[in-house]
Structures are given as C-alpha cells and as structure tokens.
Image (tube, grey):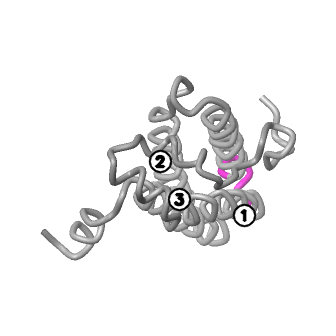
C-alpha cells in the first residue's frame, strides 16, 4: 500500500468527500492550463475526470436520506457539470475558474463538517455521511442560493 492509499484508508467518509472536491479543483486547474496552451486532449482529459467525480457524487445522493440537502447538492452538481461542459466547449479558463470558486465554497462546508465533533460522533456510531449536514453545517438552502452559469441547455 502506497502513501496515498494509506492516507485515504485513514479518512472518515466526510473527509473522502472533501478529497473528491479537492480532486475536482486539481483537475480544473489542469484544464485551465490546457485551455491556455490550446491543448485539446489534455483539457478534455481533465474535464473528463471532473465529470466522472461529479457523476460519482451525484450517483451516491439519496433524497430519502438527505432530503433537501440531497436536492440542493444534486442541483449544485448539475450546475458544475454544465459549467465544465461550457468551459470545455468554449476553451474558457474563466468558466473553469468559476467552477473552482463554486466547488471551493461547498468544499469548505464539507471540511467544517469533517471536523465537527458531533459529526465525528455520528460517524463513529455508523451514521450515513449524507446525514452530517443536518448537524449544523449549512449548504445553500435552495436553487436561489446556488452558483449560476450563463449556460443554458
């Protein structure tokens, strides 16, 4: 087992979510660099990795468990997905930066939850990590508070 695998093995479920958000930001920075260098293959590869993480996160949402938080996260993931597609289509470093800013904000809410003693207690009791946001950590309340994009389907 290498160092990275050991670090991941020692994380609680909320810390793993934070790590996925970190990965999305890292790949978006790679996409920015690729866009600036007009490297289509590298840009598409980086955005493909971001989209794969978003689809993984989206597929793990459970509205029956997370209620409104699951709905808000689903809408958030859809808006980031759209920003990434638009940024890739336009080769727009600005769209990628916008996505990074949005991801960073939500990542911080997860990072706070990962350090919250009540969340850690619930996780120690085997609680579903999707319930941790009910312990006081706040995500945007609804679509009106979500980051927006000028992109439309």
Q: Secondary structure at mark 3?
A: helix
What is the CA distance from the residue labelled 1 to the residue labelled 2?
A: 17 Å
Observer-nearest of 22 and 9: 9
Q: What range is drawn magenta here?
A: 88-92
Please tell me which residue is depicted at 59% across the width and 50% down the height of the picture. 135
| In the image: residue 12, left or right of residue 68 | left
Q: State the SS at label 2.
A: helix
Q: Is residue 39 something that shows in the picture?
A: no
The residue that label 2 is drawn on is 53
Q: Which residue is mark 1?
A: 101
Residue 23 image position (x, y, % from top left): 48, 62
* Residue at left offset 63%, top offset 40%: 73
Q: Position of residue 153 (x, y in %)?
A: 77, 28
Q: Can you say which quadrant of the picture contains the N terminus?
A: bottom left
Q: Is residue 101 left or right of residue 114?
A: right
Q: Does the image show residue 91?
A: yes
How would you rate the neighbour count of disc 3 (Cα within 10 Å): few for under 14, some for 14-19, many for 20 or more? many
Q: Which mark is residue 13?
A: none
Mark 3, residue position: 21
Callout 1 secondary element: helix
Q: Residue at x 72, y 64 (%)?
A: 101
Sequence-first tag of 2 and 3: 3
> What whole-number distance in Å separates the C-alpha atoms at marks 2 and 3?
8 Å
- Image quadrant assignment for residue 86: top right
Question: What main secondary structure does the magenta stretch of the protein show?
Answer: helix
């Amino acid at each position: 087992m290498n160092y990275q695998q050991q670090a991941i093995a020692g994380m609680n479920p909320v810390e793993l979510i934070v790590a996925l958000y970190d990965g999305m930001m890292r790949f978006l920075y790679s996409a920015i660099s690729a866009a600036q260098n007009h490297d289509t293959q590298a840009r598409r590869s980086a955005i493909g990795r971001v989209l794969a993480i978003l689809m993984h996160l989206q597929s793990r949402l459970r509205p029956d468990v997370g209620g409104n938080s699951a709905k808000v996260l689903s809408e958030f993931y859809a808006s980031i997905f759209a920003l990434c597609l638009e940024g890739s289509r336009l080769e727009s470093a600005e769209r990628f930066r916008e996505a990074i800013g949005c991801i960073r904000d939500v990542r911080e809410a997860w990072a706070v939850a990962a350090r919250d003693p009540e969340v850690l207690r619930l996780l120690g009791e085997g609680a579903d990590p999707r319930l941790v946001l009910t312990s006081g950590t706040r995500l945007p309340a609804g679509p009106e508070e979500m980051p927006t994009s000028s992109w439309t389907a």
